[in-house]
Image (cartoon, rainbow, N blue to C red):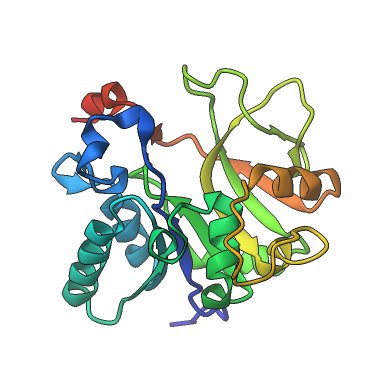
């Protein structure tokens, strides 16, 4: 059997948000641990990563982070060979660092190329594959995004998609960023990002401005994913999933 020349890379699962729109469900349970079809929401992408051979995971936490700590410890004990590291933003700073701030905080744990995904998005058919990683590593892009058709609650979308497979800030047709992507650490270093790697000062910063700058430079590729996908942002959407 021929082995791919790409070693498995880590993944960062974003799980630090307060989940205000999900209240009162999130008053006592962090959103990534709310059950969907009998499993905690964040367990779905963790299982998909494991099925693709990706065993190293970094999870950031803030709101009710101790519950996610316990879940990750239990997951690791039940999956020998897996490695879950928790970046405790709430414990370290008293607040969540937003997406770019959280990734910058965890950057020393992530290496040169890594997956990023959200712990509150349900995409049961998405496949995390070594082939995608190998293709991204062979490119000169700083990020590769998976886009989805716009849901009813986000009709304007986020980014366009060129015929050459580049993400666009301006386009007649735009799609929604699925929150799943491959990234290079360079995007979270100067000149793209002003946060010091490791984010010792606890800067909270969103990801979108970094992405938009890199998109303007032609350094972000993208593709369309049309499988089941739900941003579980309200109790109604959670209920619809069963």
Pick whichever, 120 or 193, lies toward us.
193
Pick whichever, 94 or 228, lies toward us.
94
Q: Is residue 132 visible?
A: no
Pick whichever, 150 or 95, lies toward us.
95
Q: Is residue 109 visible?
A: yes
Give how far across and how far down residue 50 sits, in percent. 33, 66
Which quarter of the figure is the N terminus placed in?
A: bottom left
* Image vertical order of residue 157 relative to residue 80, above or below: above
Left or right for 30, reference 228: left
- Residue plotted at (62% across, 20% down): 156
How many callouts does the rendering have?
Answer: 0
* Image vertical order of residue 168 relative to residue 109, above or below: above
Give how far across and how far down residue 5 sits, in percent. 57, 81
Which quarter of the figure is the C terminus placed in?
A: top left
Give how far across and how far down residue 180 sits, in percent. 51, 49
Quarter where residue 229 is shown? top left
């Amino acid at each position: 059997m021929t082995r791919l020349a790409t070693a498995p890379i880590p993944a960062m699962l974003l799980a630090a948000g307060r989940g205000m729109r999900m209240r009162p469900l999130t008053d006592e349970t962090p959103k990534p641990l709310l059950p969907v079809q009998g499993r905690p929401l964040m367990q779905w992408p963790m299982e998909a990563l494991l099925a693709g051979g990706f065993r190293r995971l970094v999870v950031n936490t803030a709101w009710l982070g101790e519950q996610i700590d316990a879940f990750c410890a239990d997951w690791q004990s039940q999956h020998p060979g897996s490695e879950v590291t928790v970046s405790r933003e709430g414990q370290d700073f008293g607040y969540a660092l937003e997406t770019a701030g959280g990734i910058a905080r965890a950057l020393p744990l992530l290496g040169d190329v890594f997956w990023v995904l959200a712990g509150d998005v349900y995409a049961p058919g998405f496949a995390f594959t070594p082939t995608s990683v190998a293709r991204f590593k062979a490119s000169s892009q700083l990020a590769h995004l998976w886009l989805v058709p716009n849901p009813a609650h986000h009709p304007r979308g986020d980014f366009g998609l060129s015929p050459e497979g580049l993400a666009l800030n301006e386009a007649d047709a735009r799609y929604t960023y699925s929150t799943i992507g491959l990234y290079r650490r360079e995007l979270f270093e100067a000149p793209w990002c002003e946060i010091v790697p490791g984010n010792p000062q606890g800067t909270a910063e969103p990801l979108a401005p970094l992405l938009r700058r890199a998109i303007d430079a032609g350094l972000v590729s993208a593709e369309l994913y049309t499988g089941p996908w739900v941003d579980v942002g309200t109790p109604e959407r959670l209920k619809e999933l069963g």
